Image: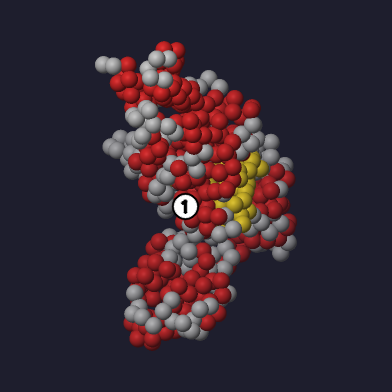
Amino acid sequence: MSELSKLLEIITEVKNEMEKIDPSIKERLDYLPTAARPGLTDLLTEVQKTLTFSDLPDIPISEIGWSSMNTKEGGMDIPSEQRAQLGQFLSNIRGNTLQEKVHSLSEFYSMNDDVIRKIEKGKTSSEAIANVISYLTFYKTLTQIITHFNAASAGFSFESFLAVLMGGKQVPTNNQTIADMTDANGKPISLKLYKEGQLEVGGSYTDLMIDLGKDANKNEMEYVCVTKNLSGKEMQQEGVLRFLSFHFNLDNVFNIFANSKQKESEKLILLPKPFLDSDGESTEGIPSKKVELPSPEELEVEYNDILDSLLATTQDEIEVELGQPLKVEELRQTLDYANNEDLFGKNPIRGKSSFSKMPAGLASVLLPMFSQNAEITRATKVKGTTLYAVAYAANEALVGRYKKGGEAAAERQEALNNLYFYDPNLQGLVERSREFYDASSPEIKKKCLTVSYGYVTTGHFNLSQRMVENVATLAQPTPGDLFNPGQSSVEIGTIEIGASRIEEVLNKVAEVLNENIFDIFNNLKSLTTNIQGYFAGGLSEDEKANAAQESAKNIEKKTGELKDQT
């Protein structure tokens, strides 16, 4: 084999190795085997500028695929391809806790010398590249989740995303728990994602009490609350995600609700008089837990059945309004009764809450159905249509099925009033219940959870953003382990998102990515220049031939090192 053939073979190997690092580089390197062709002088500069947002790994956002809910016989998880792929990237994010990971992700944006040293410390070249790409993939996937989906879909995908980041998994619905996900150690976590200033921490009080009574949960439930402050449209949105975290636990739960100074929240912790008078011994006469409403998914089936019956007598009129045939399945998907929060007003409870009559409510949800009617272009006009009236009436009929009323319900409420509201001074009742609870043993506290007014009435709790931000005060005088180890306040960090912000970081990390392959390109440039000079000089300048040979050896060595590391 001639020296020239050997050199060309080495260059081809370099090209193949580079394609493994960046598949998109193939088209830019196709001419490399023709060593005498000029252009390699500009190649280094080009490669250093080609990595963009679109070049980053694109993880398919599959909610079910990420959740890792399927198991083999014996209980071993079966990760989906998407989850496994995402997990490989996110495993490189520095930190053991969510707070540590949020800090390292936020720190990454600065991309100063200290950050670069942390990323590369103790790493091989390929590992350093993998670290950088992992951080960038995190930001790209997170940006797509937050900006591509409606509130319900984004929240569910965000649960999956954080579960993968923490090495855990999502919790299936209807599992009698308020948890949405678990971390790598199986710790349950409830996740809330809201616009900044509109955060609400709420849900089933009964499920929360059940969770706090579980010794397997260490009698606590962590809440991770994320607020988003974004501007712009779709993928052009940019802004900040703010992370907050705290624990409801067996020590502080009654304090938090009592100190909230919200009448409905305070009532949840009331304890029955016979129970208090007997120091927690007697539960005589305390009604059993009220039968809860069916799940949102079950209520959606009932809603659709009612809707179908109403459409049967109004379909012709509705099709005239739409200007096209009515597609019932499309209507169902548009309404998305079980998940679409836009249908309702504040703090919706399906089966109890009416649809919002505001233009931004049901009318706005139905507006896309009227795309073929040039006269109905605004939500306010939708409110006058038969379709709007039918969709609204179907929910009112469903609410009617589950509304309070009837002799049995009245008798039950009278019994509850005698047990829990035996004194007109509500604040006095709240303080007596809280003082008894705080002074009780852990075992008596667990009994308190299941005889409290909110538990037997299957009530719902709600804490505003301001309350969450002041949870350290609300949890007094017995906060217990309100925060995770190493956490001093409810806020654990912020993360900036947005395509343009990622592009800025890409420019900063170009050096980190390229310095690991710079030697290859530098020697490749020297190789080409000297070969061209050797041929141009009529094969008489031996020093250029020697320099080209030395560059070829360096390329072979460096490529081998990178290949071994990979």
SS assignment at label 1: helix
Question: Residue 110 appears in which quarter of the rendering?
Answer: top right
Q: Is residue 178 above or below residue 111?
A: below
Q: In this figure, what is the number of numbered marks?
A: 1
Residue 336 makes an appearance in the image: yes
Q: Is residue 488 above or below residue 537?
A: below
Q: Is residue 494 above or below residue 346?
A: above
Report which residue position mark 1 lands on.
Answer: 156
Query: What is the crowding at mark 1: few (fewer than 14 residues within 10 Å), some, or many (at least 20)?
Result: many
Task: Point out residue 298 in the picture as x, y percentages from the top left corner.
Answer: 39, 63
Residue 88 makes an appearance in the image: no
Task: Point out residue 526 in the picture as x, y percentages from the top left corner.
Answer: 46, 22
| Picture quarter with the N terminus | top left
The structure residue drawn at horizontal position 50% and vertical position 45%, both measured from the top left corner, is: 53
Residue sitting farthest toward the left: 1
Task: Point out residue 503 in the picture as x, y percentages from the top left corner.
Answer: 56, 44
The structure residue drawn at horizontal position 44% and vertical position 33%, both measured from the top left corner, is: 39
Question: Residue 251 appears in which quarter of the rendering?
Answer: top right
The structure residue drawn at horizontal position 54% and vertical position 71%, both measured from the top left corner, is: 361
Q: Of 454 and 468, which appears nearest the observer?
A: 468
Q: Is residue 226 left or right of residue 306?
A: right
Q: Of 72 and 340, which appears nearest the observer?
A: 340
Q: Is residue 348 above or below residue 121?
A: below
Q: Of 448 and 12, which appears nearest the observer?
A: 12
Task: Point out residue 320 in the picture as x, y percentages from the top left corner.
Answer: 38, 86
Q: Amino acid at mark 1?
A: Phe
